[in-house]
Structures are given as C-alpha cells and as structure tokens.
Image (cartoon, grey):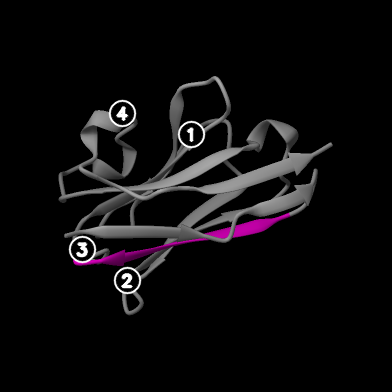
Amino acid sequence: QVQLVESGGGSVQAGGSLRLSCVASRYSVSSNCIAWFRQAPGAQRDWVAGIDRGQSTSYADSVKGRFTVSKDNAKNTLYLQMNSLKAEDTAMYYCAAREFLLGCAALPRQVQYKYWGQGTQVTVSS
C-alpha cells in the first residue's frame, strides 16, 4: 500500500529555518498531486502548500513568501523549505497525496486527499 513518511521536524528559534521531507512508496510523486498540511494542538488541520505533476505550486496566505514546496521525482520525495519561522508555525506537519486532478496544487480540504503520513513535529520558540 501507499506509504508517506515525513522527517526533518525539530525545534528551532523564531527566524530560523527547517526543511521537511516526505518520502513516498508505491505512489508516484511525479505523476500526481501532493501537499503539506499542519495541525497545532487543539486546532483543525490546515492546508499549507501543494504541488502537482507539472510543478505548479500553491501556498496558504500565512506561509506565502516564507515556505517553498518542491519535489525530487527521482527520489520520489516531497520537500517543504520553511524560512523565517514564527511561533505560530508550531504544529505537526503532515504530507498528503492524491491522484492527479486539474488544479490539484491548491486543494485545501483534508477529504480531498487519499493518503496521509504520520507527521513530523515542528516547534518554533520565540
């Protein structure tokens, strides 16, 4: 079955950077759509960024200009480069994937994704 495994989370001070990775198994990152979500304690899970098979990307307003989503098709891996981190970026970050659909780089709802990873924790201290 499809597996998505996130890594790269950790603790960092405000203003710092982290890069998250999501390695996919039995799922083609190059042919489909894949995204990052995050969930802070007591909050709903929010869409952060997405990328489709054509390398089109889309971002939530809260991270635009600070985060960059990318993928390495040869490694079947999704990345999230997070710069200028803020305390409000503290959350569990999840990788989510689905089959290709036109416009799927900007699908913001959890139900629109079929596959999920277990998450990686990001903690930003101010």
**Amino acid identity at mark 3:** Tyr
Secondary element type, mark 4: loop
Q: Which residue is drawn at 53% across and 31% down?
A: 61
Whether tag 3 and tag 2 are in contact, CB under 8 A, the answer is yes
**Residue 23: in magenta span:** yes
Please provide the residue range marked out in magenta: 17-27
Report, in whole angstroms, how far the alpha carbon at label 2 lies from the one at label 4. Answer: 23 Å
Choose mark 1 or mark 3, whichever is in front.
3
**Residue 15: in magenta span:** no
Secondary element type, mark 1: loop
Residue highlighted by disc 1: 60
Q: Residue at x 74, y 42 (%)?
A: 124
Of helix, strand and loop, which mostly describes the magenta segment? strand
Marker count (numbered): 4
Q: How crowded is mark 1: few (under 14 residues within 10 Å), some or many (20 or more)?
A: some
Q: Residue at x 19, y 67 (%)?
A: 26
Residue 15 lies, in percent from the top left, at 79, 47
Report, in whole angstroms, how far the alpha carbon at label 1 lies from the one at label 2. Answer: 24 Å
The quadrant in which the C terminus is found is top right
Whether tag 1 and tag 4 are in contact, CB under 8 A, the answer is no
Report, in whole angstroms, how far the alpha carbon at label 1 lies from the one at label 3. Answer: 25 Å
**Amino acid identity at mark 4:** Arg
Whether tag 1 and tag 3 are in contact, CB under 8 A, the answer is no
Q: Which residue is drawn at 61% across and 44% down?
A: 65
Q: Which of marks 1 and 2 is nearer the N terminus?
A: 1
126 and 1: which is toward the camera: 1
Report, in whole angstroms, how far the alpha carbon at label 1 lies from the one at label 4. Answer: 12 Å
Residue highlighted by disc 4: 109
Residue 2 left/right relative to 117: left
